[in-house]
Amino acid sequence: MLDLNFYRGKKVFVTGHTGFKGSWLCKLLVHLGATVIGYSLLPPTDPHLYGLSGIENDVISTIGDVRDLDSLKQAFLTHQPELVIHMAAQPIVRDSYKDPVYTYDTNVMGTVNILECVRQFACVKSFLNVTTDKVYLNDDVPNHPFKEDEPLDGFDPYSNSKSCSELVTHSYKKSFFGDGRCAISTARAGNVIGGGDFANDRIIPDCVRAIENGVDIIVRNPFSTRPYQHVLEPLYVYLEILEKQYLSREYEGYYNVGPDDCDCVSTGDLVTMFCNAWGNNLRWINQHDGGPHEASFLKLDNGKIKRVFDWTPRWHIDATIDKIVEWTKVYLQDKNAIPVVMDAQIQEFLTR
């Protein structure tokens, strides 16, 4: 279990802090009393959670590109962080088909650059690289949950670039951190959903946009199965990994941070749950658009984090949908109340 007092006064460096997961993570860290140093590009969407959440007033923010090593070094030199969590990425599968060079440059060389900073600055004692459930070689075998020791070989440029990011981390760990001065881990999360995601080509944002526009929800692949989880679930585990390995290197490793089997549902079932929770006769329609290859089945074996950290999910898929609907209704009615609902959801999650 996460020690809720551990982060008080700690300096935590977060790449990708202006994104969806990054904004929730910053909110959580500030709630826990951390000094948050963010490094990221400008928010990738309009609207964006970073602004709506009010978190921009509570973090030390540097707008920069992880591909810029000199800029990253300057941020480390200025702020001297103790813990580093790397989440900056080009995160969209479909976008990776459109611009594979940018995807690899950001996701691979960005990882090299952040690890090079960790290598050069002795102030860092704990580092976590956040990758994805898509890093594995996936032959679409039904009901096969991936374990941490299976081959890393993602199919599309996004997934493959994250496989490469894992390998870069493994190499740096073996080559430069054998002296024990900094603990190094990676975390492979499932399909993260929650209030405040406005990205393109993601199912929950598609649902929200359909509500805003008064149209049916378009679902392009309703039969694909994914390990869906509320954004606070993996963020909590990330912080526990960072904390535990800061205190003891025995917790270093490569972790699947996925939900239980009951939360691995088809996209169609997920949208049906959303429609039922929303009400007002909200509907979805199946409309495949002939897009590029995406895996039809994906599930993570979460046994390792359960054994090592005695972890269990706090919000299963039904509660997750309820929280997203709660957040979205506040967003549509009074955007100024977003910081309040986020703080309330974080407090409820931590005390559950």
Image (cartoon, rainbow, N blue to C red):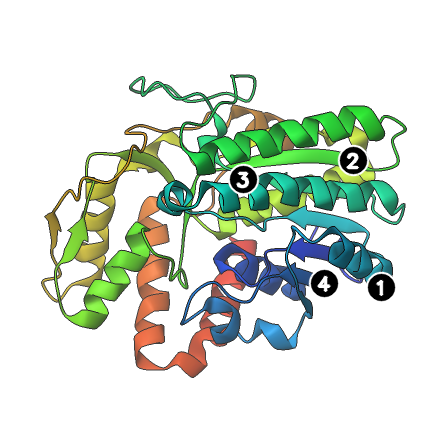
Q: Which residue is mark 2?
A: 183
Residue 37 marker:
4
Q: Position of residue 169 (x, y in %)?
A: 68, 32
Q: Earlier in the sequence, mark 3 or mark 4?
A: 4
Q: Which residue is mark 1?
A: 78
- Classify 242 as above or below 61: above
Q: Earlier in the sequence, mark 4 or mark 1?
A: 4
Query: Closer to the observer: label 4 or label 1?
Result: 1
Give whichever of 39, 35 is nearer the camera.
39
Secondary structure beneath disc 2? strand
Amino acid carrying label 2: it is Ala
Secondary structure beneath disc 3? helix
Visible in this render: residue 194? yes
> Which residue is located at x 72 percent, y 46 percent?
114
Amino acid carrying label 4: it is Ile
Pointers 2 and 3 in contact (CB under 8 A)?
no
Secondary structure beneath disc 1? helix
Q: Which residue is mark 3?
A: 104
Q: Earlier in the sequence, mark 2 or mark 1?
A: 1
Q: Toward which corner of the image does residue 31 lie, by quadrant?
A: bottom right
